[in-house]
Image (cartoon, rainbow, N blue to C red):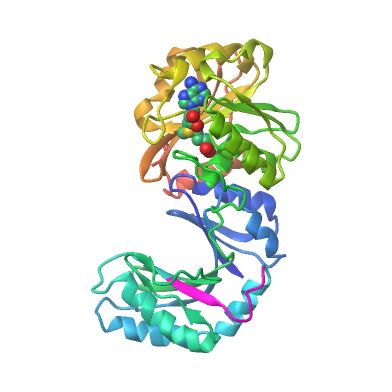
Amino acid sequence: MELIARTLRGLEWVSAAEIERRFPDARRIRMGNREVTFEYDGPAAALLRLQTVDDLFVVISRIDDVGATKGAVARLAQRVRGLDWDEALHRLSAARTAPDEFFFDVVASIEGDHRYSRFDVENAVGEQVAPLWGATHLARTAEGLSSSERPDVTVRLFVKQGAAVVAVRLSAAPLHRRPYKHDTAPGTLHPPAAAALVAIAGMRAETRAFDPFCGDGTIAIEAGLQHPGIAFHASDLDPARVENTRRNAARAGVEIDTGIEDAARIPWDRRGPGAVVITNPPWNNAVRAAGGVSDSLDVVWRSARPALRGGRLCVLADAKLDIPTRLAHLGYRRGFSTRIRLAGRVTSLILTGVQGDDRPELPHDLGEWRRRAIDARVVGPEGL
Ligand SMILES: C[S@@+](CC[C@H](N)C(=O)[O-])C[C@H]1O[C@@H](n2cnc3c(N)ncnc32)[C@H](O)[C@@H]1O
């Protein structure tokens, strides 16, 4: 079957590498803007454990010459009605079971000139598919779903350059919505971004990893899911966030050592050498930098240096903080940096080591996929 994995903008290559590594039988892995398409006929349930992917869809069909006028909507809905909707449910059943009586919604994205709204398309398609499935269509307006029911199945239409790809979400909810992430507070990290950071940091089973700004524990938990049994110490100044980390980790079945600590006062000399620090520090947007870092994060990067000898530092932060320049001033050697789009903001992702050590490199497969993404102009050498 053909699948579309929706990804973060700028990290398409990380998801392509994850798909290839986890599914060696996957074929025709190709990257596009915010997506990776591939073919795969193996056990589908395992696909739901992809960590760097935002959302995953099974392609049902392609429809050409959709048209841009108001009248095009009814014609498109008629053509969608002619597709094999029993087969669509059958494909889902390889990964999970939908209840006998179920609710579904339709989500459309439309690129290019058109004289109709996404809601026109969604509601016209929903009306056509509902009787074929014997299911209840949950109509959508600009305010969201018009019912308090949650959809069991989502039909997805990608309309681009006059053609529509009709697909069905493989999971019930988007993959980025992790069941473990129940206890959260503002500024918490998008789990696929945390998983990408862990992949880029290149951890091994024996790695001792730290996140001194752990918030609700997303990075530590994604690391534990990627590398079961890894030693991870997650700390934060805010006791409520540390408690969130503990609860989320217990739900995820991941063991994490936690502490309430000011990142400016961590006894790094007892935590290295060879430490891997993976973190997303406060950006003074959703969460303010507090305690010993309220003026600058430099104190953390400076004091952590001895522990990072032979290790690496991987940071995700708003581009306006200009962390790459700060780290270069403080004796770090940049291995890799890129810019991605996260929650609508341009964000820097940096992998560094301390000066005097070998330059840290991307894991081999990630480096290969990044080169391909640059060659295919999916990303630029600096990311976005
Ligand atoms: C961007 S959030 C981290 C979000 C986290 N990655 C998650 O997934 O939830 C930044 C965190 O830094 C913490 N923080 C602010 N000042 C701190 C300090 N001096 N020491 C340690 N943590 C601090 C905040 O409490 C907040 O949880």
Where's residue 299, x and y in %?
A: 48, 13
* Position in image of residue 278 (x %, y %): 57, 29
Q: Nearer the viewer, residue 225 or 311?
A: 225
Q: Report the number of numbered marks.
A: 0
Magenta-highlighted residues: 96-106
Which of the 4 quarters of the picture holds residue 279?
A: top right
Report the front residue among 153 and 145: 145
Where 342 sits versus 292, above or below? below
Q: Is residue 103 magenta?
A: yes
Towards the viewer: 28 or 235:
235
Q: Residue at x 46, y 44 (%)?
A: 374
Identify the residue shown where x is 67% and y is 49%: 21
Q: Is residue 297 visible?
A: no
Let me know if residue 258 is in the magenta part: no
Above-or-below relation of 1 to 249: below
Residue 328 point in image, percent of width and height? 45, 17
For the N terminus, the image quarter is bottom right
Magenta span dominant secondary structure: loop
**Residue 282 or residue 359, whichever sits in front:** 282
Q: Residue placed at 42% from the left, 54% from the top?
A: 33
- Residue ID at (71%, 41%): 254
- Residue 142 seen from this side: yes
* As drawn, 92 above or below 224: below
Image side of residue 159 versus residue 102, left or right:
left
Indicate whether 63 appears above or below 4.
Answer: below
Work out which quarter of the rendered image holds the C terminus and state it.
top left
Q: Quadrant of residue 196?
A: top right
Q: Residue 14: where, in percent of width, then height?
A: 55, 45
